[in-house]
């Protein structure tokens, strides 16, 4: 299992490194502020059978959630 993965911020384009928590399940979604531009991002994490992660993000717009 990989301990970290990256995604690109939809607001500023920076590559962001995040820790992977396999105990949270194989399909995860959560809101996190970009550490560079401070805009909220909806983070998606999918873990395969080997624990390898695919991570992507979407800009969180006002009114979601």
Image (cartoon, rainbow, N blue to C red):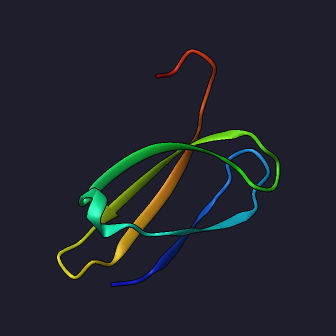
Q: Quadrant of the N terminus?
A: bottom left
Nearest to the observer: residue 57 or residue 26:
26
Say which quarter of the image contains residue 8: bottom right
For this view, does 46 lie left or right of residue 18?
Answer: left
Report whether 1 appears left or right of 62: left
* Whole-percent x, y for residue 52 in the image: 33, 78
- Residues 51 and 10: in front is 51
Q: Quadrant of residue 23?
A: bottom left
Q: Position of residue 24 (x, y in %)?
A: 30, 57
Which residue is pictured at 79% across the width and 51% down the height?
Answer: 12
- Say which residue appears at 40% left-offset and 45% top-offset: 29
Q: Is residue 60 above or below residue 51?
A: above
Query: In the picture shown, does residue 42 fall above or below 34?
Result: above
Q: Residue at x 56, y 15 (%)?
A: 63
Q: Give x and y (percent) for residue 57.
A: 54, 50
Q: Does residue 64 lie above or below 17 as drawn? A: above
Does residue 37 sit above or below 15 in this rendering?
above
Q: Quadrant of residue 27?
A: bottom left
Instruction: Write the residue at 74% across / 44% down.
Output: 11
Count of residue discs = 0
């Amino acid at each position: 299992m990989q301990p970290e993965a990256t995604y690109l911020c939809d607001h500023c384009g920076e590559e962001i490194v995040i820790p992977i928590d396999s105990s949270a399940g194989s399909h995860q979604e959560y809101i996190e502020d970009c550490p560079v531009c401070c805009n909220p991002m909806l983070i998606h994490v999918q873990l395969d059978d080997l624990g390898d992660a695919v991570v992507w993000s979407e800009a969180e717009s006002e009114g979601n959630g």
